[in-house]
Structure formats: structure tokens, C-alpha cells
Image: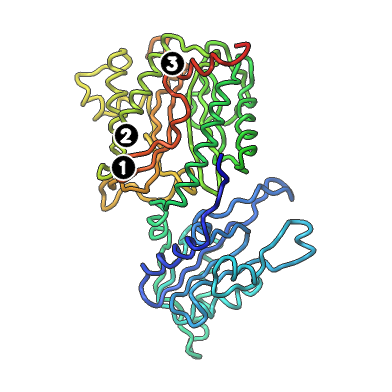
Amino acid sequence: MKSNKPVSQDEYDQRRKALMAQLPTHSVVIIPAAEIRYRNNDADHAFRQDSDFFYLTGFNEPDAWLVLTPGHTDGDCHLFVLPKDKVQEIWTGYRTGTEKAMSHYQMNQAYELNKLDERLPALLDGREHLYYPMGRSEALDQKIASWCQKLRQKARAGAIAPESQHNLLPLLHEMRLKKSDQELTIMRQAAEISSQAHCQAMTICQPEMMEYQLEAEFIYYFMRSGSRSVAYNTIVGGGANACVLHYVENDQPLKDGDLVLIDAGCELHNYAADITRTFPVNGRFSEDQATLYQLVLDAQLAAIEQVKPGLDCHAPHRAAVRVLTRGLMDLGLLSGSSLDELIDNESYRQFYMHGTGHWLGLDVHDAGRYKVNGQSRPLEAGMVLTVEPGLYIALDDDSVDERWRGIGIRIEDNVIVTRDGHEVITQDVPKTIAEIEQLMAATPNR
């Protein structure tokens, strides 16, 4: 595998400039980094930077603040960071400090964090428009209010507080929606690592393994390949557990004759992959499993064909729903006067209750609106989305024949919208019945 390279600092600088170019004159932007979160007592979770802050800086330390002041005499870009501290760095690791924050991260000014309350009002002074992640947290809203109030109290001395406050996120999330070439390179690498991990899971799966043992293979493969984290909690659902959409207990044995649904992806340089495959624990689909599986696969292939520029972002869902509903009618799982009636009534939601995809990027459910002016937005080159139809027939659903109960199937790939159509970047994971059975048959002692 090629070496993994993060996004260049020049691109982060270009993003900040592109954001500032959209703002009215006399604007200021404030956006905080993530804070350390504690798991219990003084044991903290692994740090993960706030995606919006990271998108504009590439800076991966906690408790920092980015302030953008286009046209300010002290420059446009200001970063507040934790100070260099030899004692603290012995305990918690390296800190960038102000000097390197300016040189490496291409900031005009950098300040130690303890200067925030002193310096922020001065950077706000005279600005008419204030942009920040409005409503994201009560603590942030209170900080913003206190800084503005400090300025208002100095009105007699000529201080001017911003009178117009705006939510930064709609602007910023529109920027995040279309990925650059550097971002797509990272996402292809994350997809490659995740794809190979799924292949590995298929080759080692055996009846009586525990679900968490398969989960462990993903974590091992991700880290061995250069990813330091999963992109989300891994789902390994054997048998009827696959019918729980966000099943994460992963603590049951895998049974001979059951299917196992695995939804797992790695995070690489903060970008996510998101793949789901469903396969037989013993390596061979039963006739009923194969029938439902092929229906889901047909729906997914039809949905992927709807990923192209100019079509709207909900076209894949409509295509998947049509294939699934027709198939469920043919199997006698749904009945009605017509296919269109069943679709209009959403009768399929008894067995398929989620959407067919979502944006993918720095967040596994990435930023960006799905509707613009009340209409489903058209797909554009550079957007990345998942395509993931499924069928879930609950074990206690006595409205269907017992042969179908307890079967859960989802097939999910990651798809880039290109100028001419689409690119499936997770296509290396087998998903036809024949491909899956062939790969699993090569496992020794199966």
C-alpha cells in the first residue's frame, strides 16, 4: 500500500481564504477545537479533533481556537493554542506552541491559550458580522456573549461589538461537501484499508467464533495498515442481531447456518470509510438467504447506477426502494394493488426502514444539506456518499413465513461522484454470492 499523506497546509490555507471570500466586509469567524473528553474519573477518551476546526487548520491538538479577521491590521488568521510546557509535555505529550503554530500552520498570529479572554474582544472590536458554530454548545454561546458584552461596556471608549451574529456551519458545511483531490486520495486509501479488512474477516470467519473476535480483526488490520482508529463503532451482528440497525454489543457466538452482517470502516487522517457486507458464517448461503441477499444486491446495483452528476441525491434511494418493493411483492412478503401504491404508502418500511445513503468525509455522516430550497440537491463531481440498501426481517415478525424470520442483510459501498458518473472506491470487497463463497471456500479447515 502507498504511504499515507495528509492534506497539505497550502490547502488548509486555501480553505480559510475561500471561506473568508464568502463573508461580508467587516466579518469575524470564531471556531473552537475539540476538548479532551473523559471516559471515567481521570481516564480520557482518545482525542479526536472537531471536524470543522480540522477542516480549516489541520491542527490536531485540543483546546485551541481559530479566529479569522479578514482585512485586520494584524492579519487574517489567528490561532490560540496551549503553551509549551516541559512538565505537562512529559505527562500528556508534545505541544506545538505559538512559534510553530505560525510557521507550520501558516497563521498570521498565534497566542497562548491563556490570552484568549484578553485578546478576543480586541479581535471582535469593529467587526459588524460574527460567524461561529451557533447553538453547538451552551458554553460556546455563553463565551461569545461574554466577549461581546465586554466590548459593549467599552462603547464610550469607542469599542464596537458585532451586532449581527450568524451560524457559520451552513457556509462551512457547503465547502466540506465537495472533496478536493487530496481529500479523495485519503478517502481512497481509507477505503482500501477497510476493504482489505472486510476480506480478511470473510477468510477467518468460522462457526462458534464470537462476534467480538471478528471485530478485533478489524481493529488489528486498521492499525497495522496505518489507521489509528475506527471511523465509528463496529457492528458485527450474527443471525437476528443483524436486524438491529445499530447493534454494537458484538458479544454473541456466530452460529452455523446464520448470516453475519459487518458494518466497519477505518478513519485515516480524520477521513472515514464506511463499508457493510453480509455473508454466511459457514461460507455457504442457504437458498432463502441467497434469495433475499440477491434482492438487496440488485437494489444496491440499481442505486449505484443513479449516482451521477445532475441526478438528485435521493435518486439512489428511489431506485433501491423500487427494486426492493418489487422483489418483496414477488416473494409474497408484501401485497397490494400495485407497486406504485406500495411505494407511495411506504409499505416497504416494515423490512427496509432507513435511507439508502449519506454523505461521507471527515464525519461518517458527513456535513452538507440534502435539500436546497426544498428540493433534493443535484449530485456534483467531488461529492462522496454511501449506497447501502438492506432488508431486515425481525425474528418475532409473525406476519411473514418463518423461513424468512431473523434474516438481516445490508450491502454498503462508498461512491465518489465523478464528472462522467461515479467511482466505487470499496469495490475490492466481494459482494456477489459466487465471489463471497469462493473467497470463503479458500479458508483452510472450513
Q: Where is residue 69 in the image (x, y as percent from the top left)?
A: 47, 74
Within 10 Å of disc 2 (Cα), the crowding (few <14, some 14-19, many 20+) is: many
Q: Residue furthest front?
A: 2
Eyeballing the image, is 222 above or below 375? above
Residue holding disc 1: 313
Within 10 Å of disc 1 (Cα), the crowding (few <14, some 14-19, many 20+) is: many
Amino acid type indicated by mark 1: Cys
Q: Nearer the viewer, mark 2 or mark 3?
A: 3
Residue holding disc 2: 317
**Label 2 vs label 3: CA separation?**
26 Å
Front one among 304 and 140: 304
Q: Where is residue 183 in the image (x, y as percent from the top left)?
A: 46, 50
Amino acid type indicated by mark 2: His
Front one among 417 and 297: 417
Task: Say which residue appears at 40% left-offset and 23% top-offset.
Answer: 391
**Label 2 vs label 1: CA separation?**
8 Å
Q: Is disc 2 in contact with disc 1, using a CB cutoff of under 8 Å?
A: no
Circle 3 sits in a helix, a strand or a loop, which is it? Answer: helix
Quadrant hosting residue 147 = bottom right
Circle 2 sits in a helix, a strand or a loop, which is it? Answer: helix
Front one among 441 and 228: 441
Q: Along the polypeptide, which appears first: circle 2 or circle 3?
A: 2
Amino acid type indicated by mark 3: Ala
Residue holding disc 3: 434
**Label 3 vs label 1: CA separation?**
31 Å
Image quarter (top left, top right, bottom left or bottom right) of the N terminus:
top right
Q: Where is residue 139 in the image (x, y as percent from the top left)?
A: 56, 62
